[in-house]
Amino acid sequence: MKKQKTLYGILACISIVFILYALAENYLIHPGAEAFLIHKTGLKRELNLPVWLNVMHVHVAFACIAMTAGLLNLSNRIFEKSRRFHRISGYVYVVSMLLVVMTSGYMAPYATGGKISSMGFNVLNMIWLLITLAALVQIKKKRTIRHRNWMIRSYAFCFTNMLIHLITSLFHQGFGLAYATSYIIGVYSTIALLLLIPNMIISTVSRSQEAVVTFK
């Protein structure tokens, strides 16, 4: 139980910091996304900047809402105190996730790195949808533990943008690769990490719960 609380505390800290950063960066510091747009060279489709910026702002807003709702949804304390609030936050998460995926689908053809990056984002979106659907199916069947595990996997995809930019910065600034190449590496590395890390967390939590049962 203590390990679960520690993991949730770490997750909450990372989520809150990232939400605040995303809101400040996209709505206060660089609302026109100038620093990001300079890397979008050689696009095969003409970028309608006003539309793209509006879609991006909607994308960021609902990504932050999804991250907040998902964090509340994963709280054991909230789940135990109010099942109704847990369900509501779950529905808010799913609706927000759908809007994030839809806006991401619009922006994918304009992704830095061209078609290869675009394909990666489409794969990310499909995986996120399927994983979230699996979570919904499990709760409809009253399989609470399986539902929670699939929600953990789904919630990991809220960190897609953060991981992509961290990995891109590592390869671009750390190893001196071209930004577009680094971004492509970031996209596909993120897919692998988002499938791997949640399973490691689920395994750690499961072992912790088994240890408590054995001790009792």
Image (tube, rainbow, N blue to C red):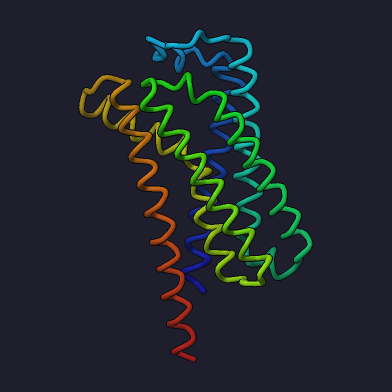
Looking at the picture, does residue 92 appear above or below residue 199? above
- Count of numbered marks: 0
Looking at the picture, does residue 88 appear above or below residue 142? above
From this viewpoint, which residue is outermost toward the right? 84
Give coordinates of residue 129: x percent, y percent: 56, 46
Tell me the quarter of the picture where residue 77 sits: bottom right
| Image point (43%, 11%), residue name | 44
Of residue 102 and residue 72, the one placed in the foreground of this image is: 102
Of residue 67 and residue 107, the one placed in the foreground of this image is: 107
Looking at the picture, does residue 171 appear above or below residue 13? above
Give coordinates of residue 184: x percent, y percent: 33, 29
Give coordinates of residue 26: x percent, y percent: 57, 23
From this viewpoint, which residue is outermost toward the bottom? 216
- Horizontally, residue 71 falls left or right of residue 121, namely right
Tell me the quarter of the picture where residue 151 sits: bottom right
- Horizontally, residue 44 falls left or right of residue 144, namely left
| Image point (76%, 54%), residue name | 88
Give coordinates of residue 14: x percent, y percent: 50, 46
Tell me the quarter of the picture where residue 63 sits: top right
| Image point (58%, 9%), residue name | 48
| Image point (63%, 61%), residue name | 137
